[in-house]
Image (cartoon, helix red, strand yellow):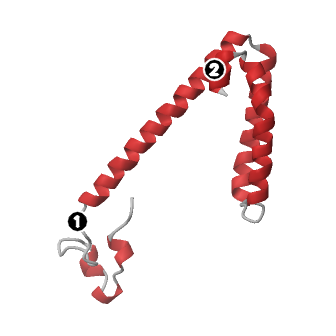
Amino acid sequence: MPLVALAISPVKAAAIVLPILIVQDWVSVWAFRRDWDLRNLAILAPAGAIGVAAGWLMAARVDEQAVRLAVGLISVGFVAFMLLRDRLASAAATERRSRPACSGAPSPASPASSAIPARRRRWSTCCRRG
């Protein structure tokens, strides 16, 4: 929608793109009709309702330039999020690679080494993934 909004009014652009998005949602619901989670639905349904209400209020009460600004800010926000997410993921992967491999036992200086017998120590208590 941001590209279409560059050529025409953002409200008209949303009206043009909306039928495509509705069909896309139908296909997604059909494809995942057997794999759904109530917890995800409980989070997404109210958030979707808030988004629809905010969009309706913006389209009904705000002038075209403010809608253009909102579309632009949301687009820049998505790009910033994607760049930041990729950089944080690569930094975390680098940190995981630089950690020493676990031997399965705590060091002799660790208080856990004397409290837990060696045969009861588990790898998961030594190496936790971050």
Q: Is residue 37 above or below residue 117?
A: above
User: In the rendered structure, which disc, 1 or 2, sits on the residue that comes first in sequence?
Assistant: 2
**Quadrant of the image occupied by residue 123:** bottom left
Q: Amino acid at mark 2?
A: Ala
Q: Quadrant of the C terminus?
A: bottom left
| Secondary structure type for disc 1 | loop
Residue positioned most to the bottom: 119
Query: Residue at left 71%, top 40%?
Result: 47
Q: Nearer the viewer, mark 1 or mark 2?
A: 2
Q: Report the label total.
A: 2
Dot 1 corresponds to which residue? 100
Q: Secondary structure at mark 2?
A: helix
In the drawing, what numbered circle is on residue 59? none
Sort mark 2 into few (<14), some (14-19) or many (20+) by Cα contacts within 10 Å.
some
Residue 50 percent location from the top left of the image: 75, 34
Instruction: Give the residue furthest to the left.
Output: 109
127 is higher (above) or lower (below) than 87: below
Q: Seen in the image, is 65 located left or right of residue 119? A: right
| Residue pictured at 53% horizontal, 29% vertical | 77
Task: Residue type at mark 1: give it.
Answer: Pro
Residue 59 pos. (x, y %): 78, 19
**In the rendered view of the protein, which quadrant contains the N terminus?**
top right
Q: Looking at this view, is 84 or 49 the one in front?
A: 84
| Quadrant in which residue 119 is drawn | bottom left
As drawn, 116 above or below 7: below
Query: On the image, numbered disc 2 is attached to which residue?
Result: 70
Where residue 6 sits in the image (x, y, percent)? 63, 17
Distance from disc 1 to disc 2, alpha carbons, whole Å, reads 47 Å
Near mark 1 (Cα within 10 A), the count class, few <14, some 14-19 or many ≥20, is few
Residue at 62% x, 24% y is 3
| Towards the viewer: 13 or 130 | 13
